Image: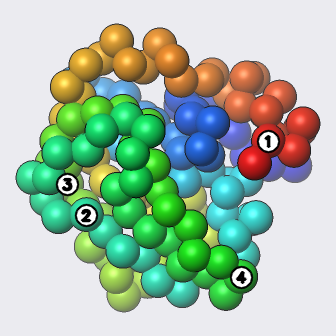
Amino acid sequence: MMNTPKELRYSKDHEWVRVEGNKATVGITDFAQSELGDVVFVELPANGVAVTAGKQFAVVESVKAVSDIFAPVSGTVTAVNDALTDAPETINSDPYGAGWIVVVELADPGELAALLDSAGYEKLTAEGGH
């Protein structure tokens, strides 16, 4: 059974978003990390870079595949999880906690409305939504 925390929002590209004020912490979902397999490398964006919803901002490389990670929201990167450089496998072991990828200051909080809630995301993955 995949873990899909209720308090988060989800993109169809398998990213999660935890919103606190005007900041959004972003990572990849439990479903995504299990599909990828063992993560061996994460290419992180630079701090201060602008990201655009739906556009690639990071790369996660696993033993099986190299996957682009798409920004679920637009804004400016205000924090990057540098710990993933030395311990990329944290994405597998704790995708919603220590395995976060970036924090983004939201350019348009209205974009959050386009994201899925946990029930919507569970439905997507149950239908084999890749």
How far across and how far down the image is residue 2, in percent?
80, 48
Which residue is denoted by mark 3 in the rendering?
A: 79
Ranked by sequence position, the earlier of labels 2 and 4 is: 2
The figure's colour scheme reads rainbow
How far across and how far down the image is residue 128, in percent?
87, 44
* For discs 3 and 4, the disc positioned in front in the rendered view: 4
Which residue is denoted by mark 2 in the rendering?
A: 45
Q: Foreground residue, 96 or 106?
A: 106
Up-down relation of residue 74 to residue 62 (above or below): above
Identified by mark 1, the residue type is: Gly
* For discs 3 and 1, the disc positioned in front in the rendered view: 1
The residue depicted at 17 percent of the width and 45 percent of the height is 50
Neighbours of disc 1 within 10 Å: few (<14), some (14-19), many (20+): few
Which residue is denoted by mark 1 in the rendering?
A: 129
Identified by mark 4, the residue type is: Lys
Cα distance in 3D space between marks 3 and 1: 29 Å
